[in-house]
Amino acid sequence: MTTRRQFLIQTGAGLAALSAGKLSSAKELASAKEEGKRPLVISTWKHGLASNEQAWKILAKGGRALDAVESGVQVAEADPEVTSVGYGGGPDREGHVTLDSCIMDEKGNAGSVAFLQNFMHPVAVARKVMEETPHVMIVGEGARRFALDQGFKEQDLLTDQARKNWQQWLKTGKYKPWSPASNPTHDTISMLAVDQAGDLSGSCTTSGLAYKMHGRVGDSPIIGAALFVDNEVGSACATGVGEEVMKTVGSFLIVELMRQGLSPTEACKEGVQRIIRKNPNWRDVQVGYLAMDRLGRVGAFAIHTGFQYAVHDGQNNVLMDSAGYTD
């Protein structure tokens, strides 16, 4: 596994700013020297590596960060081996694969869908909500009708393996939200990118907690919880137990902390500590945050060890271990 130190040595000057000092305000951040800054894409978990590769194809050609984060996470959405995102994702307790997704661009525009069923790429539907409607979020049957109107095709997302696992679960029907003990690498994909123009965008997409209550929606489609982008400051995203992220509006909090002068890592750490201070049962859940400021400095922090994130700078695409509160 690549350590943080090894990664910085490998990538050299392009990511040297990862360890730079704090900037005291959004104004300073906006006026800071940016010579040597280049496109960058980061995403959550091991499945972020393949998604980063796809996103980089767009960034390398001078494309928009928005296009990169939409295209990138679609790799995970379509991969049946990624059992927490889209096709192949674990169903709810009634056997339905329900999807949540959001996307946000450099201008603060956002779109999301929640409790959407039978569409391979909910992130693409979320982008259509952003660009083709006056709304931010459309859910359930309304989201299904909107997707059909936009030309998306329905298909069954429940794979044979996911169905088999669900049927096995039904024998006991014990429900416990995602936790460090249950599966430490099973979760949402969130992605952040900065393009050659210096513009930021982000996306998040998931099939949510396996065997959840029918109709449950987590943080993944919630702007400000799972994802927030402010082009003057930076962007942040979340992974883990969505209820904890929603209750602290985690991604918005992290971006605002960066605006006040905290580095991405420091801001992510405070986001995690906010959960720990408010939830006496914090040891039973996992939340990981990932952030990038507009200079391309990256930071991450989680409640427990085990959270990993992928970073692609055009020379290397590597998996990093996040620090955790329980280290």
Image: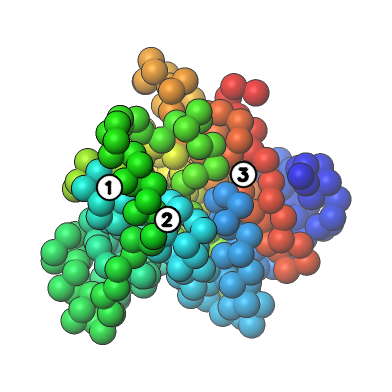
Closer to the camera, 185 or 282? 185
* Dot 2 amino acid type: Gln
Residue at image x 26%, y 75%?
154
Q: Could you say where residue 275 lies in the image, as x and y percent from the top left?
A: 41, 26
Q: Secondary structure at mark 2?
A: helix
Disc 1 or disc 3, which is closer to the eye? Answer: 1
Q: Residue 161 has which mark?
A: 2
- Relative to residue 158, is residue 214 drawn left or right? left
Q: Say few, some or many: other residues with alpha carbon within 10 Å of mark 3 (under 14 / 14 to 19 / 20 or more).
A: many
How much space separates mark 3 and mark 2, taking CA atoms?
25 Å
Q: Residue 308 has which mark?
A: 3
- Relative to residue 69, is residue 307 drawn left or right? right
Residue at image x 37%, y 70%?
121
Closer to the camera, 268 or 89? 89
Q: Say few, some or many: other residues with alpha carbon within 10 Å of mark 1 (under 14 / 14 to 19 / 20 or more).
A: many
Q: Where is the N terminus found, in terms of image quarters? A: top right
How much space separates mark 1 and mark 2, taking CA atoms?
14 Å
Dot 1 or dot 3: first in sequence order is 1
Residue at image x 72%, y 55%?
318
How much space separates mark 1 and mark 3, taking CA atoms?
25 Å
Q: Where is the C terminus found, in terms of image quarters? A: top right
- Relative to residue 211, is residue 30 drawn left or right? right
* Dot 3 amino acid type: Gln
Q: Could you say where residue 81 lies in the image, as x and y percent from the top left?
A: 51, 58
Q: Residue 92 has which mark?
A: 1
Dot 3 or dot 2: first in sequence order is 2
Disc 3 or disc 2, which is closer to the eye? Answer: 2
- Relative to residue 222, is residue 15 drawn left or right? right
Q: Could you say where residue 287 lies in the image, as x and y percent from the top left?
A: 47, 35
Residue at image x 49%, y 25%?
273
